[in-house]
Amino acid sequence: MQTSHLIPPEIAHYLTRIMRRRRWQRCLRALGRVVSIMLITTLITCLLDRWLRLGQRLRLMAWIVQSLVALLILIKPVARLLIARVNYLAAAMEAERAQPSFNERLVTVVSQLNADPARRGSEPLLMQLSEQVINEIRKRPRANIPFGRQVWRPWLLAVIIMLLYASLWPVAALGFSTLLARTLTPLRDVDPVNMTRLMVAPQSMEANEAETVVITATVSPVPADPPVLWVSDNDQTWTRSAMSTLDGPQVGLNTRQYNSEIRVSDRELKYCITSGEARSPNYVIAIRRIPTVVGFTVEYVYPEYTRRSSRSVHNTDGWIEAPSATQVILTMTTTESLRAATMNAENQHIKMRELDPTHWQASLALEHEGPYSLEMVSTRGIEGHGPAQMSIHITPDRPPTARLLAPALDQMAGARQVLQLAYDISDVYGI
């Protein structure tokens, strides 16, 4: 075992720096090997997956093997860097190779100081050599160990492989980005790359009820059979139909376009397209529902002179009828959540107040009668209107009426005779 207490501290510190720098270089070399090996094995796995469509289990096993190989390569140099003791004689030999000006004096001093005292050379001569080595170290205090080919060669190989990756990335037929995603994240559900290239337009959309939507598929290479459009409104049963060839100029070499129509109902639809081994993701046609009014609640607050208490009326046509100066609170219930609603009556534009997304309220005092309208905008930006022929009708306040009930016929009466009369007095709102 080598000991450092006999080696002069200045020489021991210098050799420690030499050995630590060399161990860092070995770690860098090992890391370069790991990067190169990982790049090569990843490329091989991607190419195998391209042609064989490797399953998730096989891709996971390849990833585990790559990780274990990387660990085995790195563990030894890292362990030496962190926990291994300094081999002063090996460090001295490294320093001699890096700085020939030592003329083997450094190796001689270290080997002699660590040798059996009975076998050492002349003590004065050894001390003189030590002083010479210390002076040489003081001239070059930095422990410079050049990077050899063994350090940068694996990194050069890694750069070459990365350039190969860059050249493969834009090749659409290879699908290199998808292959990398499947190889590096084997547990993710990434669809394999297919020989058939399939592009669908549009990819999910909104449509009005009863609207006809045209779906276009671009397929390369041209398949023997036309693509198939699959449509479902419940995720369980799917209807299939062959797509038609789209007439027009050719979009690319060995590429053809197809289209098909979907009639939108009142339910959300899902669709996908298959062609050969290729299958598109499931896309969605969301229904762009126009907001409509389900019903109205009209609350009347009558003028004080009518002596009538307030009341509420429910209807679906928005009919408003009350005496002039009646305060009306109109609440509407809608089929869709709204972002804004406005009531337009005569020259008034009343911004309705939100009670909740489907209940909106407006207040007005009846002064004029005539038609009025409602304008709505749903939270999805779809405009809607209230029922047609909504109207405000002001009930006229007619004069009171009096009617004699008895006697029914003319009567003769003497002086001071008392006659019994029965009569009826009425008014629209009260006397």
Image (tube, grey):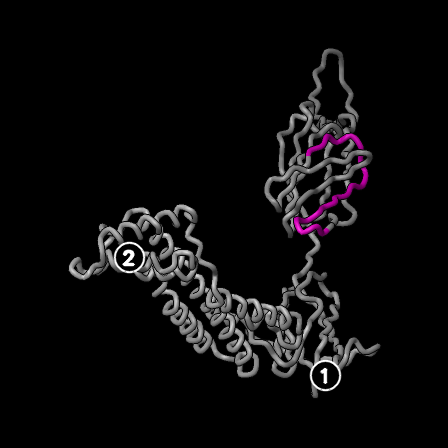
Q: What element does badge 2 sit on? A: helix
Compared with residue 340, is residue 145 higher up or lower down, i.e. above or below? below
Q: 10 Å neighbourhood of mark 1: few (<14), some, or many (≥20)? A: some
Name the residue: 48% across, 61% down: 147
Q: Amino acid at mark 1?
A: Val
* Span of residues in magenta: 363-382
**Viewport quadrant of the C terminus:** top right
Q: Residue furthest right?
A: 249
Q: 10 Å neighbourhood of mark 2: few (<14), some, or many (≥20)? A: many
Q: Which residue is mark 1?
A: 222
Question: Residue 378 in the image: x percent, y percent?
Answer: 68, 49
Question: Residue 11 in the image: x percent, y percent?
Answer: 32, 50
- Report the Cα–Cα distance between label 2 and label 1: 77 Å
Question: Residue 397 in the image: x percent, y percent?
Answer: 77, 29
**Viewport quadrant of the N terminus:** bottom left
Q: Quadrant of residue 375?
A: top right
Q: Which residue is mark 2?
A: 110
Compared with residue 220, is residue 177 higher up or lower down, i.e. above or below? above
Name the residue: 64% across, 79% down: 274
Q: Is residue 88 left or right of residue 430?
A: left
Q: Is residue 40 visible?
A: yes
N-terminal of the two: label 2 or label 1? 2
Name the residue: 77% across, 77% down: 252
Say if the magenta span includes residue 140: no
Q: Is residue 188 visible?
A: no
Q: Amino acid at mark 2?
A: Val
